[in-house]
Amino acid sequence: MKNFKHSMYSVLFLLMTTVMFSQGKIKGTVVDNELGGSLPGVNVKIKGTTSGTSTDIDGKFQLNSTTNSGQVVITFIGYKSITVDYAVSNGQTVDLGTIKLSSDSSEIEEVVIKSNVIDIAKDRKTPVAVSTIKSAEIVQKLGNLEFPEILANTPSVYATKSGGGFGDSRINIRGFSQENIAVMINGVPVNDMENSRVFWSNWAGLSDVTSAMQVQRGLGSSKLAISSVGGTINVVTRTSDIKEGGVISSMVANDDYLKTLVSYSTGKMKNGLSASILLSQTFGDGYIDGTKFEAANYFIGLGYEFNKKHDIQFTFTGAPQWHNQRNQAISINDYIKYGNGDEPNIRYNSDWGYRNGNEYSFRTNFYHKPVASLNWDWKINESTKLSTVIYASWGRGGGTNGAGAIRGNRFFAPNLRTPNGLINVDLINAYNSGETVNIAGTNFTRNQIGGAYQNSSSTSNNATNGISKIASINSHNWYGTVINLNKKISNELTLDFGIDARTYRGIHFQNLTDLLGADNYADNFDVNNPGRVLNYTYAAKPNFNPLFDTDYQQKINYNNDGLVRWYGAFSQIEYSKNNLTAFLQGAISQQGFRRDDYFKYLESDPLYSTDYENILGGNIKGGLNYNINKNHNVFVNSGYYSKQPFFNAVYPNNASIVNENLTNEKIFGVEAGYGFRSSKFNANVNLYRTSWKDRFIRLTANINHDLDASTPTIPGSAFIQGVEQIHLGAEFDFTYKPINTVAINGMISVGDWKYGSNVTANYQDDNNVVITNPTTNEVFNQTLYIKDVKVGDAAQTTASIGATVEVVKGLKVDSNYRYVDKLFASIDPVNFTTEAANKKGSLELPSYGLLDAGLSYKMLVGKDNKSSVNFRLNVNNVLDETYIAESRTNTHLKTQADFLNSDSTPNTVNYQNYKDTQIYDGIDKSNQVFFGFGRTWNFGISYNF
């Protein structure tokens, strides 16, 4: 018995020794495949065992294996799970290297951020508030929505369709409009260099070629001196060396929408060459009445890797398009007038009609803005990299409008409308060509001038003028470069230094699109060629030749160029060690503004072509992120920005006279954030404050210069300087994946955005003459009481909750509910001339909520199931909610005090009648608004091979 016990102990000791010495170690690093950042908190487990761990702050892991071979299963919320084979010798450590996790979605492009020109924020490292949306989500959920709308469920973002025409959407971030949001494509700034606007219709095909889009709220991490007051939208497009394969897809949607797309990429070939091409076409009738559209998109990418040190990428992309618009915000009264009973016709559009039975719009946008870029990445040595991008953009096109009048009636006048509210284009055409027409019960026949029916821009009431359709051309030639040198000084310190140089010429004039039956058009605005009579018209369609010259075209009304030169330098030092990352960044830029006016000034006048007005600006930003452990991190950042004014502030009132009171806008921002990461639950909390001082605003105004109501007003402009806005807010967003087949996401953002002080307005008439008080002969100015008035045109409170469920393998359903509150109307500061107006403040619009839903199915096909057929159905605004998305006016409800008898006693009858007939959903029906879209849908099918 004793010997038996000794034998058993010996066997157990031998087994324990064998297991102990047969153990091997497995290690590796897990990163995001698209953006390259490390992923902490990732679950790493040996398949078939209980042995597991999670990655640390740097995405690294290590665990023991009791077998010589097996499989490691790696899972993380929002990413595809992958399995990695391993083999390890007894007592040894095997390094699985860098393991890349891809986004958990059926369609994902490979995004390789090679260039240091592209400022992509990395999770738990870059100290900014950020949201990243990858191509799969864009492809699946965007459907027939506008590109900015994919961001609608991001904290502090408000995106609307505005007038509802194709590509006419807009976006606000933290209460700041598009002009104050920097948009970057592959590190290249695309905001217009004169006014910083972004017209999404010019980028109609951007969603087709986007691999990832990142929104950095606040001043952001970009090293350039850009206009990122509210935030930065970084778009990373596909590269030529993405994996080999292609896509053929088609999508149909409401209102005869049809989109077709084909793309193919060679992948990187053995000789280092790569190529990618994408072509698509889209057309439809538009949800809003009278908004037909047609758009194309092309993308060509060529790449060549000379060796491990040198890599070049050339891309050329563009999206020629034309679309009819709803430009004019319409009163609620008119929506109801042309609706069904008391229900508004939210599709109503007052800018179109029929001509000979065919749709005819006075508001057509047409544009083609191709962009070419050449990226060169040079790995000088292991610690030094040089990234260079040279780019060019040639924009050609504009938008149309009506000019002139018939007996004092503009094209949009009620007297020139049909009973259903459309423009009576046939009547206009008949009158223009000399036929007798009936206007408001009276017959009129047009008189000729010199034996011809002659139109002009005059709107006076006479018997000779008519109405034309004209186009405002806003073309440009833009060339630039961004060069960034990245030097790793030590294991902890990295230095970036670079330059940003741009040159831009904006080409602005008007020409004739349609004489509408008239013989010619008289123009007397060119002082160098007065008394011209023109008759040549130009189609309102995009030109596919991006370099075509417009000098030969006959121009009317105005003809000027805006030139901008930009020279900038930037530098950034970054410190990263263990759990701490910090950066300090500074940038300086000189913007030079010049104006050439070929109509307003004689060629001998110095104002015919001005000198450059050079203005210095720049920014300084800093921040740090501290990873408390693998789950928790905190960050803080702050920055100051001295921002040059826009072109129209340098040369106000469309004249070549420099504003004597030029001053830079001053932005100061501070932000703090907290993040939580785990294998199932991720969350972010951000707090921010942004102050924006010394804004310049120019507004059209009718001026009562002696404040006497009996005195006729003078048409002119209000010049408002020193405007201050203060934006405070808090944001929270999360994702939760309780099981592998269910994902839940949500967010809430609460803002308090208001004007910081009262301001003074000065006025000029239409001839740029400063208006004075006729009694005192002093310069006329007014105090505008806007202190603490809410900033309008965006929702200050938004929230959303959504879920995605994989019902069976390959079949997913998802839904999302978004709530909007504290949405204020756009305000005009010149209307706040009294303290009483200040007390009323901004008009608050009704809150609303929208439910969206979708279904997708992925079917694997082909050899080794490497290809797939994908189906996607989206239904937006499932409940067909009627809601007001924007208001261009700020008319408050009237009170009993507004309805008085001649003896000042209350007129209760009129007041009750007002309440019964002139209020819609709690606001006055006279407000000019844009309703959002009702229920829409789209269905797409794609073959990926």
Image: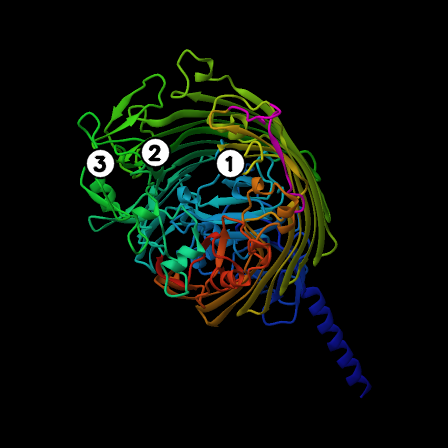
Circle 2: is it few (<14), some (14-19), or many (20+) Cα within 10 Å?
Answer: some
Which residue is at a point 62% across and 59% down the rendered structure image? Answer: 748
**Spatial distance from mark 2 to mark 1, Cα to Cα?**
20 Å
Residue occupying image coordinates x 74% and y 76%: 12
Protein image colouring: rainbow
Q: Is residue 307 visible?
A: yes
Q: Which residue is mark 2?
A: 460
**Which residue in the structure is indicated by mark 3?**
446
Q: Which residue in the rendered view is the most extreme toward the front?
A: 903
Q: Which residue type carries mark 3?
A: Arg
Mark nearer the N terminus (1 vs 3): 3
Q: For the stretch drawn in magenta, what is the main secondary structure?
A: loop
Q: Position of residue 225 (x, y in %)?
A: 59, 33
- Give whichever of 68, 278 is nearer the camera: 278
Around disc 3, counting alpha carbons within 10 Å, would you say few (fewer than 14), some (14 to 19), or many (20 or more)?
A: many
Residue 487 sits above or below residue 623 on the image: above
Q: Residue at x 20, y 31 (%)?
A: 519
Q: Is residue 39 magenta?
A: no
* Three-letter code, disc 1: Ala
Contact? badges 2 and 3 (CB < 8 Å): no
Q: Is 578 on the left or on the right of 328, as rendered?
A: right
Magenta segment boundaries in residue numbering: 769-789
Whether tag 1 and tag 3 are in contact, CB under 8 A, the answer is no
* Disc 1: which residue: 701
Between residues 741 and 674, which one lies in front from this camera angle? 674
* Quadrant hosting residue 620: top right
